[in-house]
Amino acid sequence: MALSYKLHHSGTKQGRPGTDYPVLASVPYTNFYCDEQPYPGFFADTESRCQAWHYCDIDGRQATFLCPNGTQFSQAVFVCDWWFNVRCDLSEALYVINTRLYGTPRENPARPHRVITKELLQNIFLK
């Protein structure tokens, strides 16, 4: 399936820091744990409103990073993007995209495997 990523940037879009997007100065503590994910990869942290993101390696080790202020981690394309291009509310449903990186899920994940649907993809890329 071929997807096109439609950016919604038409000039400069002003936002209110702390309201329209998070403005964290350091990586926050959240309840995200790589050992609860069924596969390795890149994961937006929805508790941080997607300003933080995690990399889970194939052994379950976790590294956490922070996107610059004004940006959020896009689970759809695995990069920090302008806040108005990111649908943080859909991030967890897109974790399954990580299966493209390493193939199969880990054995005995604590969370069930999520399924991505055509409707979900259309909400992200055709909004």
Image (cartoon, grey):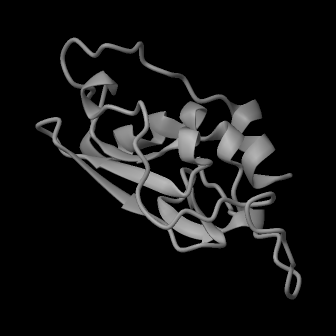
Q: Quadrant of residue 91?
A: top right
- Rendered location of residue 89, percent (x, y): 70, 39
Name the one closer to the observer, 39 or 70. 70
Q: Is residue 43 left or right of residue 11?
A: left
Q: Position of residue 74 (x, y in %)?
A: 57, 57
Nearer the observer, 92 or 14: 14
- Vertical order, 33 against 85 (above or below): above
Residue 6 showing in the rendered view: no
> Is residue 18 shown left or right of residue 8?
left
Q: Image point 87% across, 78% down: which residue?
A: 14
**Total numbered labels placed on residues in the image:** 0
- The residue sitting at the left extreme is 59
Residue situated furthest front in the rendering: 25
Left or right: 108, with 66 as reference point: left
Identify which residue is drawn at 59% across, 30% down.
Answer: 116
Q: Is residue 3 above or below residue 7?
A: above
| Residue 27 visible, this orientation | yes
Percent of width and height locating residue 51? 55, 58
Q: Residue at x 27, y 16 (%)?
A: 109
Q: Nearer the viewer, residue 95 or 89?
A: 89
Residue 67 placement, left or right of 4: left
